Image (spheres, rainbow, N blue to C red):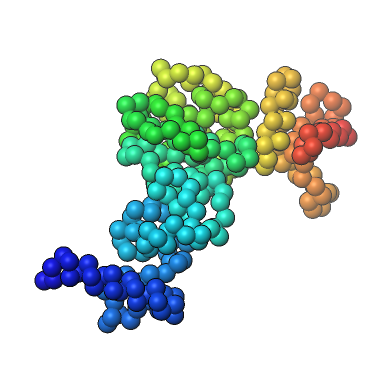
């Protein structure tokens, strides 16, 4: 066994060899000569997703000096990504998941996004849920909601701790505005990551929780056939006007059954002359097109 001082000297010598031989720094030292792990400015295994800097250093994937270089970007305390990695909300959620304490998870709108829903707002902070007795360091990129969390409320998705689809829906329906909640529920239903009956069962199991009535209303209004937030908002306006529930994604077909068009919302009859249909098309500009014929 080498003494501590001798081993330290060998490690320093190996580092000097890499520094003064650029070709070695790029390709690594031959296995027979290796004393320390290969030193590289962009380890392939680290360039694809967020990682804990301390873990990568401890496992020999990177050095502290290289990590401080221009090739890496610090997202959160001890969490880094490669500078060329596109940063979207999924990456932020993955980064946050690396530093969440045990028993906490990505929840709320962030969890809905991981389960397939589009973002409600551009570049929102990540959202997490934590037990009421679990302290978490404040961070402007992570909004934490403290609540009661049962073990069955949590799962792992893509290596990230996240609330189950049912618990996600349970929180969305109680905590968000009706429109925002239904938009996210519609999207999760459309992606088939959420089953409405399971979310309703969770609401039945927890009748004493705050704002469960709001959740039940949101679930009753949700429809997985909606293809955009604008369609959901329009459907809610129709509901609030007291008009009968429309059929989303109505297909207009010719005499031979051929598809002519597909419209956002439609009614059959609707107190109009026989064989009359009403269709409404939602546009991104918030001006709704209506056709009666």
Q: Quadrant of residue 62?
A: bottom left
The quadrant of the rendering that contains the C terminus is top right
- The one nearer the camera, 214 or 60, is 60
Instruction: Decide if residue 129 is on the left or right side of residue 60.
Output: right
The quadrant of the rendering that contains the N terminus is bottom left
Q: Residue at x 19, y 69 (%)?
A: 7
**Residue 115 place in picture, x, y as percent:** 51, 44
The answer to whether residue 193 is visible is: no
Q: Residue at x 33, y 30 (%)?
A: 134
Instruction: Decide if residue 255 is on the left or right side of residue 181.
Output: right
**Residue 72 place in picture, x, y as percent:** 48, 57
Q: Quadrant of residue 113?
A: top right
115 to 26, vertically: above or below:
above
Instruction: Decide if residue 30 is on the left or right side of residue 116.
Output: left
The answer to whether residue 78 is visible is: yes
Q: Residue at x 34, y 39 (%)?
A: 101
- The one nearer the camera, 274 or 141, is 141
**Residue 8 place in picture, x, y as percent:** 22, 67
- The one nearer the camera, 28 or 204, is 28
């Amino acid at each position: 066994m080498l003494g501590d001082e001798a081993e330290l000297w060998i490690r320093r010598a190996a580092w000097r060899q890499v520094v003064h031989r650029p070709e070695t720094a790029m390709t690594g030292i031959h296995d027979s000569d290796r004393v320390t792990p290969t030193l590289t400015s962009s380890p392939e295994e680290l360039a694809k997703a967020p990682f804990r800097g301390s873990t990568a250093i401890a496992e020999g994937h990177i050095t502290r000096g290289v990590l401080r270089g221009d090739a890496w970007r610090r997202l959160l305390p001890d969490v880094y990504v490669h500078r060329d990695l596109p940063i979207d909300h999924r990456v932020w959620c993955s980064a946050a998941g690396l530093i969440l304490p045990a028993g906490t998870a990505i929840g709320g709108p962030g969890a809905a996004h991981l389960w397939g829903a589009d973002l409600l707002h551009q570049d929102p902070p990540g959202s997490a849920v934590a037990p009421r007795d679990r302290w978490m360091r404040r961070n402007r990129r992570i909004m934490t909601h403290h609540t009661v969390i049962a073990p069955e409320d949590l799962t792992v998705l893509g290596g990230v701790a996240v609330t189950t689809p049912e618990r996600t829906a349970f929180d969305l329906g109680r905590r968000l505005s009706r429109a925002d909640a239904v938009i996210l529920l519609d999207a999760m239903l459309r992606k088939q990551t959420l089953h409405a009956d399971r979310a309703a069962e969770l609401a039945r199991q927890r009748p004493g929780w705050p704002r469960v009535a709001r959740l039940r209303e949101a679930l009753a209004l949700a429809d997985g056939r909606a293809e955009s937030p604008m369609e959901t908002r329009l459907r809610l306006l129709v509901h609030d006007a007291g008009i009968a529930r429309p059929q989303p994604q109505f297909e207009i077909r010719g005499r031979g059954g051929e598809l002519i068009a597909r419209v956002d919302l439609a009614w059959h009859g609707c107190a109009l002359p026989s064989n009359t249909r009403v269709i409404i098309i939602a546009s991104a500009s918030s001006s709704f097109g209506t056709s009666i014929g």
